[in-house]
Image (cartoon, grey):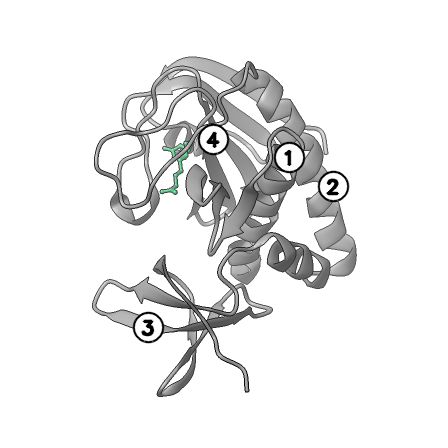
Amino acid sequence: MKWNIIDFDTLESTNITALSYPAYSIIRAATQTAGKGRHGRAWESPRGNLYASFVLPDFGKEAALVSFIIALSAGQMLSTLCPGISLKWPNDILRDGKKIAGILLEKTDDKLIVGIGINLKSHPTKAVLYPTASLNTAFDPQGILHRLIVYFDKNLTLYTQQGFAPIQSAWKEMATGIGTQIEVRLPDKTLTGIFTDLDTTGALLLKTKAGIIPILAGDVFFTQQKEKHD
Ligand code: BTN
């Protein structure tokens, strides 16, 4: 893929600026003044970390799958730089169980914006929903972005040629929490159950007393208990 990288010093949010650019642009900022996180939360954006948004054409109903493609790509890329990298549903990247990167997908009528923030130099220390970590290496944001593009290109091609199955299985291999008891916080309620699988639509399958519930969006918290098999 021929990506056109446009570098800015300061933006409100790379996801917002990305809306004005054509498909296969990448908007990167050294810092954001109003970085956006999932579910309307803020994403702290001091200098030194990576803040980038990939502009893709509309993926229609497959948009949710793209979040697994980018999360897997970031996970694979980070695994070459440090140990302890895992993936957390739906699209977080963890280092030793702490969040090191987050992804925010936003759709318009004709585009899919894939925003990614990777904590390279620093991570939030104030109260945040999850514990956080950073890479803590000498890698600069531009270098990390170039490495990420290599993996994203490879996985997008794999997806185009073979569909979601190879992405799904690679994601599951790197995923944390499958087979364990989790709590899923939804806007109106919290569900508890066993994270049994990731289905072909990207939904988390939660085994509850009421049966298997597919979860399409929510915040996952690990509650440690492994499923008992007899
Ligand atoms: C999350 O809450 O986990 C998602 C965080 C996504 C942050 C990135 S930083 C680059 C892009 N621009 C934004 O405003 N947000 C995303």
Mark-to-mark CA distance, 4 and 3: 29 Å
In the rendered image, residue 190, in percent from the top left (x then y), is placed at: 25, 68
Residue at image coords 75%, 46%? 157
Secondary-structure class at tag 2: helix
Q: Earlier in the sequence, mark 3 or mark 1?
A: 1
* Residue highlighted by disc 2: 154
Mark-to-mark CA distance, 2 and 1: 11 Å
Residue contact between numbered discs 4 and 2, judged by CB atoms under 8 Å:
no
Q: Earlier in the sequence, mark 4 or mark 2?
A: 4
Residues 201 and 176: in front is: 176
Q: Quadrant of ligand 1?
A: top left
Residues 177 and 7: in front is: 177
In the rendered image, residue 97, in percent from the top left (x then y), is placed at: 45, 45
Nearest to viewer (mark 3 / mark 1): 3
* Residue highlighted by disc 4: 118
Nearest to viewer (mark 2 / mark 1): 1
Residues 15 and 155: in front is: 155
Mark-to-mark CA distance, 4 and 2: 20 Å
The disc placed on residue 192 is 3
The image shows residue 30, relative to residue 50, as above or below, that is above
* Residue highlighted by disc 1: 77
Q: Earlier in the sequence, mark 2 or mark 1?
A: 1
Residue contact between numbered discs 4 and 1, judged by CB atoms under 8 Å:
no
What amino acid is found at the position of numbered circle 1 in the picture?
A: Met
Secondary-structure class at tag 1: helix
> Does the residue tagged 1 have its C-beta within 8 Å of any atom of ligand 1?
no
The disc placed on residue 155 is none
What amino acid is found at the position of numbered circle 3 in the picture?
A: Thr
Residue at image coords 48%, 21%? 136
